[in-house]
Amino acid sequence: MISELLEVRGVRHVALLDAAGKVVTSAGAGADITVVPPARAVVGSLRAALGTGEWQDLLLDFGDGPVLLTPHGDGVLLTAFDEVASLGRVRFAVGRLLG
């Protein structure tokens, strides 16, 4: 299922992680999944501080390329891709996959 995202131009790696941060399934060449637990903590802190509802996604831009984190149930879908300019295309594909 998530391997379909590798067909999107620029996507290098995808991984679905459960609520505990363990990989449920993944495809593609390595992305650092250790970023997920701290990113979820940041989202939790921001939600508490701002009093907002559910989060939609979080973009982290690293030296080796951006990573999009998208909530899916209690888990998180991590999508690593080539450049921020591809964000719209990646978000659209993730939305279709998860929607």
Image (spheres, rainbow, N blue to C red):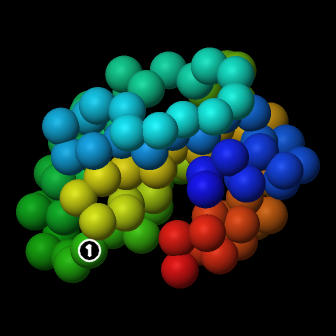
- Identify the residue at the far front of this view: 1
The residue at the point 30 percent across, 52 percent down is 75
Q: Is residue 99 above or below residue 70?
A: below
Q: How many marks?
A: 1
Query: Residue 30: horizontal and vertical position, in percent?
Result: 62, 19
Direction from residue 6 to residue 16 in the image, left or right? left
Query: Residue 26: horizontal and vertical position, in percent?
Result: 54, 35
Q: Is residue 15 above or below residue 86?
A: above
Q: Quadrant of the N terminus?
A: bottom right
Question: Would you say residue 60 is visible in this rendering?
Answer: no
The residue at the point 36 percent across, 22 percent down is 34
- Identify the residue at the far right of this view: 9
Label 1: state its secondary structure.
loop
The residue at the point 19 percent across, 64 percent down is 47
The residue at the point 29 percent across, 66 percent down is 73
Please state which amino acid type lies under the numbered disc 1: Glu
Pointer 1 local density, CA inside 10 Å: few below 14, some 14–19, many at least 20: few
Towards the viewer: 7 or 1? 1
Direction from residue 7 to residue 90 in the image, left or right? left
Question: Would you say residue 86 is visible in this rendering?
Answer: yes
Direction from residue 39 to residue 15 in the image, left or right? right
Query: What residue is disc 1 on?
Result: 54
Q: Is residue 5 above or below residue 67?
A: below
Query: Residue 7: horizontal and vertical position, in percent?
Result: 84, 50
Query: Residue 52: horizontal and vertical position, in percent?
Result: 20, 76
Q: Quadrant of residue 35?
A: top left
